[in-house]
Amino acid sequence: MNFQNAKRIHHSLLAAPEKTALIWLANHMPGRVNSDHLSVLGLASMMGAGLCYWLAGTNIQMLWAVNILIFWNWFGDSLDGTLARVRNRQRPRYGFYVDHVIDAVSAVFLLGGLALSGFMSPAVAIGLLVAFLLLSLESYLATYTLGTFQLSHGLFGPTELRLLLIIGNFALFSHMHARILGQRFLLFDVGGVIGLIGMLGLFAWVAIRNTATLYREERLP
């Protein structure tokens, strides 16, 4: 079967130094470790982070475990593809499919854990999951129809979002709530609603832009 890799677009704030670090790590990775091992590590770490969020609802010290697991998720999820490219052991269809199945499962576990933790309202967590899946779906459709795979939007990509989550976890140790216009809200609800609005707005913008591009490219006579 003929298969052509989509052009990867990644211009986030940390994209350049992250790429340098990942290539260095890939070149120093023991030969017995392969991309599949790293993919499994990434999935297991995010599933563990979701579980630890749930447990942190009754023992806030579990947030330390969440932050460590988010780091290991970055390590596995970001390095698996780089390792395959550095070693010239690429499986484009397999890698793309497995990577994004893992992303979807990881999002369910992470946001499910947040919903059960008490740090975030279930409605906000569900909204974020829906927004994430909508953006993911749009990205996969654009990959197929336009031949471009958008890894980041503006200054934000997966790594930047992980860092924001870790910073938020540290903030929870000192205050779980924020006061806005005299009203008291969960800190993660405030951040979650801001993220939800941003993600839905981004989805709408990108969907309209790509629809217009495809319309122009396939204009009927």
Image: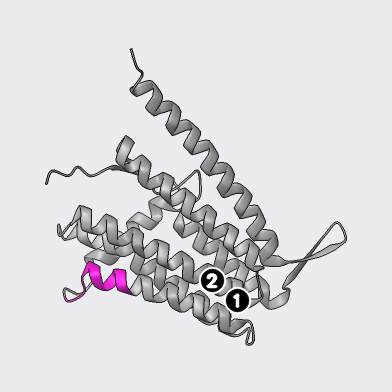
Q: Amino acid at mark 2?
A: Gly
Q: Which residue is mark 2?
A: 112
Amino acid bearing label 1: Leu
* Horizontal arrangement in the rendering, residue 142 relative to residue 65 (left or right): left
**Horizontal and vertical percent for residue 107?**
47, 64
Q: Is residue 219 above or below residue 4?
A: above
Q: Residue at x 34, y 23 (%)?
A: 217
Residue, disc 1: 116
**Which residue lies at the image location 11% right of the left edge and 46% below the top edge?**
1
Q: Please name the predominant secondary structure of the magenta segment in the image.
A: helix
Badge 2: how crowded within 10 Å, few (<14), some, or many (20+)?
Answer: many
Residue 10 place in picture, x, y as percent: 39, 46
Residue 13 in view (yes/no):
no
Residue drawn at 29 percent across, 70 percent down: 38
Q: Is residue 180 magenta?
A: no
Q: Position of residue 40 (x, y in %)?
A: 31, 73
Query: Is 129 or 71 nearer to us in this picture?
Result: 129
Quadrant of the frame with the C terminus: top left
Residues in magenta, as a range: 32-40
Give 106 or 11, whichever is nearer the viewer: 106
Q: Secondary structure at mark 2?
A: helix
Residue farthest toward the bottom in the current orientation of the protein:
59
